[in-house]
Amino acid sequence: MKNKIMKIFLCFAIMMMLTSIVPASAIAGSDGLQERVQDRDRINATTMEQFRQNMTVRERYGEATENFLRIKANNSALNTEEAMEAAKEYLNSTIDIMIDTLENEEYTEELTAIKDDVAEATTRAELAEAAREVREIWREAREEKAASAANSVNNKMTAVIRTSQAMALRLENEIMRMEARGEDVTELEGLLEQYNAHIAEAEQYQKQAGYGNVQGQMRSVQNMRQAGMSIRQANGVLEEMLVELKQYREGLVTLTGEGALSAEGNGVVVLSGDVTMSFTADNATLVIKDMAGDAEVDTGDATYGYSNIDAGNSDVDNRAYVYHNLTGDVMIEGSRLIVTLRGTDISLDAEGSGNVVLTGEGTYEVEGVEKEWAAPEANDTEDVEE
């Protein structure tokens, strides 16, 4: 009995080994085994295809690259059907990731055409030619991208230099006006000379950067970095100048919590900080930004043509309170205010901590010292929120 059981077990093991070697079609019988095997294979193939479709471009590229390198390590000649398919899959995934990266219609068309060549390739030489075309497109795209980036940086540097030059001219004019009033401007003139020197240095580095080929890009990048450094040095000098100018500049007042400001004139007044102010004006535009949400505004003794508070949209997107054609007396108080007043016949009193800029024609007094409002620049503009 024992021997009989062993014989049955041995026969079963042999059948299992044969099943693993012989194609399924060779052992399929009338019971529909062949159809079930084919159904299983179709399901597996469909499942794998769906899995691959759900993979990202980069995931497919990583899988194809890993598979290609593994096969190439065992078959450097790539002279088998499996190796050719792996090489095709690798090339196609490379093209897909380039299309996804470049996002350029012209390159997409060229690369898609190469994918057709890859599909029709039957030899390693044909695949090598397709690979060379892909590398050439990638090189061209990189050069184009580098040139575009360099052009963008150059345009931004040009804008910064022009803005700095315009600032230098305004500072020079202001220093000249101060000198005419009898102020000692020796230190300011020295700072302005340094400022101009840094700007000129930045402009020279920019010219040296140029626009050469890829080989010259490293030198161009270095020159543009030097230009940026010169601009940063110029801005450092500018900060020193503004600190120095602040104590001389007409129309600029710093409230420190002690003493009050009184002003009369026509033009624009901008106050910011923790302040309490009252004013009367004629045909004015008033804009109040309540940064802390605690502002108190009393317009009971004034009239105005329009206000966005009445329209109900002053609280939308943290917009400012706006009054147009305002005439009369107004009181405003708040811990974080930015108030802009534009009008005529302005008479204003303010106290607290913050900054005040008065531009136009008029006079103001702080701690017993009387000065004039700053003259408006020709290109000064004021944005008023509606």
Image: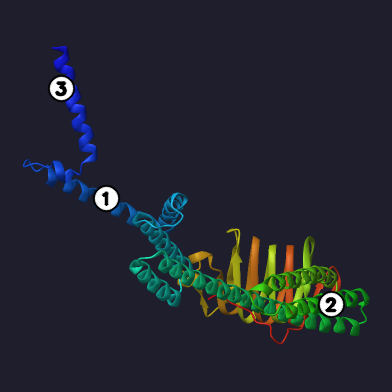
Looking at the image, tell me whether mark 1 or mark 2 is earlier in sequence order.
1
Disc 1 crowd rating (10 Å Cα; few below 14, some 14-19, many 20+) is: few
Kindly indicate the quadrant of the structure image that contains residue 377.
bottom right
Residue at coordinates 84% horizontally, 76% vertically from top-left? 370
Q: Which residue is mark 3?
A: 8
Callout 1 secondary element: helix
Residue 279 in percent (x, y) is at: 68, 73
Q: Are marks 1 and 3 in contact (CB under 8 Å)?
A: no
Of residues 292 and 70, the one drawn nearer to the viewer in this rendering: 70
Image label count: 3
**Going by the image, does 32 lie left or right of 203?**
left
Up-down: is 334 above or below 208?
above
Kindly indicate the quadrant of the structure image that contains residue 298.
bottom right
**Going by the image, does 55 lie left or right of 43?**
right
Residue 54 in percent (x, y) is at: 34, 55
**Going by the image, does 19 lie left or right of 376?**
left
Whole-angstrom CA distance, mark 2 to mark 3, is 101 Å
Kindly indicate the quadrant of the structure image that contains residue 107.
bottom left
Looking at the image, tell me whether mark 2 or mark 3 is earlier in sequence order.
3
Up-down: is 246 above or below 84?
below
Looking at the image, tell me whether mark 1 or mark 3 is earlier in sequence order.
3
Residue 190 in percent (x, y) is at: 90, 75
Whole-angstrom CA distance, mark 1 to mark 2, is 69 Å
Amino acid, disc 2: Ala
Amino acid, disc 1: Thr
Residue 60 in percent (x, y) is at: 40, 56
Callout 2 secondary element: helix
Amino acid, disc 3: Ile
Whole-angstrom CA distance, mark 1 to mark 3, is 38 Å
| The label number, if any, that marks residue 197 in the structure image | 2
